[in-house]
Amino acid sequence: MAKNIIFSTDPDWSPEKQEKDEAVSASQNQTAYLRLERKGRGGKVVTVVAELKGDLKSLQKELQKYCGTGGTLKNGQIELQGDHRNKVADYLQKLGYKTKMSGG
């Protein structure tokens, strides 16, 4: 596998810094759609975070911990048990994501 060669004149440049900067800029350009679902879940309410790209597994874990609830990652969507739309929206906005409530 070929490695990409990067040349930088910035004396403070590091690969970790570049990855962090890319993650921040990626989050600023994304909109998270938050909705509630009840169908097919035995009447239980689930908060769904949809249309995000990137490392969803770690974001899912952070959201679960922040909301104090269980959850999963299915079909590229984060599902959290219970109605946590407002908490999730606040958390994602602090990370630089735009949020929109839809449905439910």
Image (spheres, grey):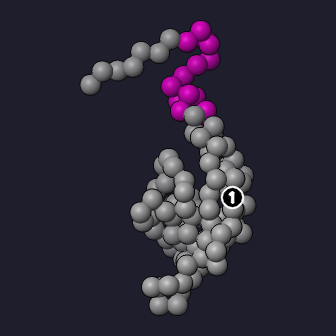
Residue at the spot of label 1: 99
Label 1: how many Cα within 10 Å (few below 14, some 14–19, many 20+): some
Is 36 left, or right, of 73 in this rendering? right
Q: Residue furthest left?
A: 1
Q: Position of residue 65 (x, y in %)?
A: 58, 65
Q: What amino acid is found at the position of numbered circle 1 in the picture?
A: Thr
Seen at 54% across and 22% down, the residue is 14
Q: Residue furthest bottom?
A: 43
Quadrant position of residue 13? top right
- The answer to whether 4 is drawn above or below residue 38 in the figure is above
What is the total number of numbered labels drawn onto the structure image?
A: 1
Quadrant position of residue 86? bottom right
Q: Position of residue 1 (x, y in %)?
A: 26, 25
Q: Position of residue 5 (x, y in %)?
A: 42, 15
Using the rendered image of the protein, determine whether residue 58 is visible from the camera's viewpoint.
no
Instruction: Look at the image and say whether residue 20 sits in the magenta stretch.
Output: yes
Q: Residue furthest top?
A: 9
User: Closer to the camera, 43 or 102?
Assistant: 102
Q: Residue furthest front?
A: 103
Seen at 64% across and 53% down, the residue is 31
Q: Secondary structure at mark 1?
A: strand
- The answer to whether 47 is drawn above or below residue 96 in the figure is below
Q: Position of residue 103 (x, y in %)?
A: 64, 74
Is 104 left, or right, of 80 in this rendering? right
Is 71 left, or right, of 32 in this rendering? left
Quadrant position of residue 47? bottom right
User: Closer to the camera, 54 or 61?
Assistant: 54
Instruction: Look at the image and say whether residue 12 sits in the magenta stretch.
Output: yes
Using the rendered image of the protein, determine whether residue 4 is visible from the camera's viewpoint.
yes
> Bounds of the magenta span?
8-21
Seen at 44% across and 64% down, the residue is 73
- Image quadrant holding the C terminus, namely bottom right
